[in-house]
Each structure stands twice: as C-alpha cells, then as structure tokens.
Amino acid sequence: MDKVQLSTIFPGLMPALRAAPIDIQTVLRQGGRGAAGLARDPARSAYIAAETALALVLLISAGLLLRTAMAAQQVRPGFSPDRVMTGRTALPRSIRKFKSALSTFFHLRSHFREGQGNETVET
C-alpha cells in the first residue's frame, strides 16, 4: 500500500475502530450524556489536533504553490520565445524500429539545420 492509499483509509478507519466496541443502544438511551464521555478521550483529541494541523499545513502549502506558479509565469526566460519551436520524440523499443527511427531523427535534424531562418538546432 502506498502513502496515498494509507492517507485516505486511515482517517476513516480510526474513528470506526474507536466506535466499534461501543454499544449503540446504550449510547442512544443516554442521549447527550454519552457524547460528552467520548469527547474527553485523549486519543481522540490528539487525533483531531493532528488532522487539524495537517489540514493547516496542506492549506498553507497550496497557497505557496499557487503564489510560486503565478510568480513563475512573470519570469522572463532570457530569450525571445516568439519564434521558438520545440518537439519531443519517443523511440520504439525494438532494435529494428529503433535504428529506423534514429536515422529518421538524424535526417530531420539535418533538415532543420539547413532550413531558412533557423539560427540554431539543438538536440
């Protein structure tokens, strides 16, 4: 099990395990008196404090992430991106197709280097 699965299962499982040995009929008969006894449980209070602290950390982190993303959009890259062309290729896994794709890649690279208006071609 990875961290994401544990972080979604644990918060719902903890209260269910704590409530499992409680007799529902007795709690319902006592009305409001039974709820006060559960609220004084130190483990439950620590659990609530930990969840609140984690929620606060996540909220602050999300705010910082958004602020950083907005600031990153304002950064000048140091070149004029108006006429920049980028591309990505994925090479096949088989050797025969790999050699063919590699020769095609080198052909395209030389074609772009010889093209009009191209200053540089990087690979």
Image (cartoon, rainbow, N blue to C red):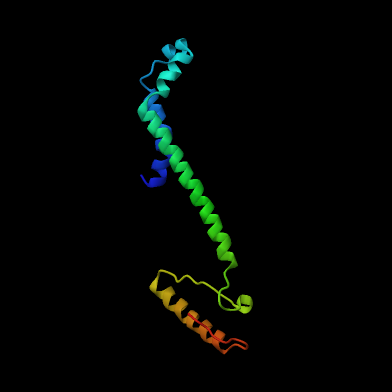
Image spot of residue 90 (x, y percent): 47, 70
Q: Name above or below for residue 68 compared with residue 109.
A: above
Q: Name above or below for residue 107 compared with residue 22.
A: below
14 lies left or right of 76: left
| Residue for point 39% across, 23% down | 40
Q: Name above or below for residue 38 compared with residue 78.
A: above
Q: Residue furthest top?
A: 29
| Residue for point 39% across, 73% down | 95
Q: Nearer the viewer, residue 94 or 106?
A: 106
Quadrant of image for the N terminus:
top left
| Residue for point 57% across, 87% down | 119
23 lies left or right of 77: left
Image spot of residue 53 (x, y percent): 44, 41
Q: How many marks?
A: 0
Image spot of residue 77 (x, y percent): 56, 74
Image spot of residue 47 (x, y percent): 39, 33
